Amino acid sequence: MKTMQKRKQKSRRVLPGFGMTMGITIAMLSLLILIPLASILTYSFHLSWSEFWELMRRPNVVQAFVTSAGCALAAALINCVFGLILAWILVRYDFPGKRLIDGMIELPFALPTAVAGITLTRMYSDQGFLGKALEKIGIQAAYSKVGITIALVFIGIPFVVRALEPVLEKLPESYEEASAMLGASRWYTFRRVIFPELLPALLTGFGLALARGIGEYGSVIYISGNSEKQGTQVVSYIIMQKLNSGNVDYEGAAAIALVLLIISFLLLFLINMVQMAAGRRTRR
């Protein structure tokens, strides 16, 4: 009798039963994700393989992919360096204003990307105080790939910091103390003791920042200048151009969006593989 009561207690759930919960989940997943993605596939399949390949080989489309991927990669690498430093400071040190700075990490998520783009463009243009300072040393930030990278650093830094913070919080300081007692230098301790523990989380943050940066639109559309001649058009701008032109090209826009979707899926798949490998390593 007691065994039956225990089984009933274990089977109780705060939310409704499995069938209803799974039904609600699938319905929301279909409405918000699966059906929109299916529409991209549907419009993309309206093009023949030769038309699809001809579209992907156009100079402006190729240049847009190179610009988006290159700037996103550069920004993700920069975020790995400064995101690691920022996460380390926030976890290992106490100082006045720490909570304020920690809260400001989420600002790129809360701030509309268009507002961020306008603000960054103003700051880094030849009329802005940061833009003027960079121009004195021969760097044009706004309306160049430098500006695109700056915008992507802004929107990508939270991914790296938030991925690293939980790992740093669980990483015992005794590892560093033991390494120091054995005579290891600070650089050796970081390279051989700390960094291997942080690497899976760092790769996760890097992948998320890279995936977000490749398809970013709002924060880069103003600061990029959208110049085909200077190679500052991004992929998202090409898609919007096809949708806003006189002859709306849904099929072409969907085909380019499909390539972005595949790239994002591959990045997310690699991120999940890294997380699984890190989980197996932790359980050992």
Image (cartoon, rainbow, N blue to C red):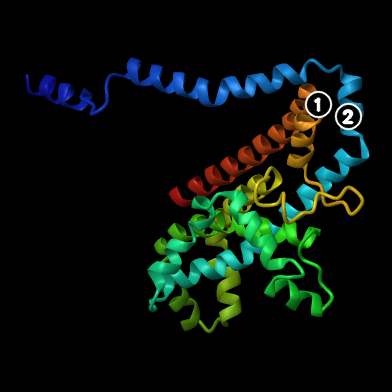
Between discs 2 and 1, the one toward the N terminus: 2
The amino acid on which the numbered mark 2 sits, given as a three-letter code, is Leu
* Residue located 68% across and 45% down the image: 217
Secondary element type, mark 2: helix
Q: Residues within 10 Å of mark 2 (few under 14, many from 20)?
A: some
Q: Position of residue 47 (x, y in %)?
A: 83, 18
In-front residue for pair 170/136: 136
Residue 254 against residue 220 in the figure, above or below? above
Q: Quadrant of residue 269?
A: top right
Residue 119 left/right relative to 9: right
Residue 131 left/right relative to 171: right
Dot 1 corresponds to which residue?
252
The amino acid on which the numbered mark 1 sits, given as a three-letter code, is Gly
Residue 211 against residue 256 in the figure, above or below? below
Dot 2 corresponds to which residue?
55
Q: Position of residue 254 (x, y in %)?
A: 74, 26
In-front residue for pair 180/87: 87
Q: Are marks 2 and 1 in contact (CB under 8 Å)?
A: yes
* Residue located 46% across and 59% down the image: 167
Question: Would residue 82 be seen by someone viewing this image from the given angle?
Answer: yes
Q: Quadrant of residue 9?
A: top left
Disc on res. 270: none
Secondary element type, mark 1: helix
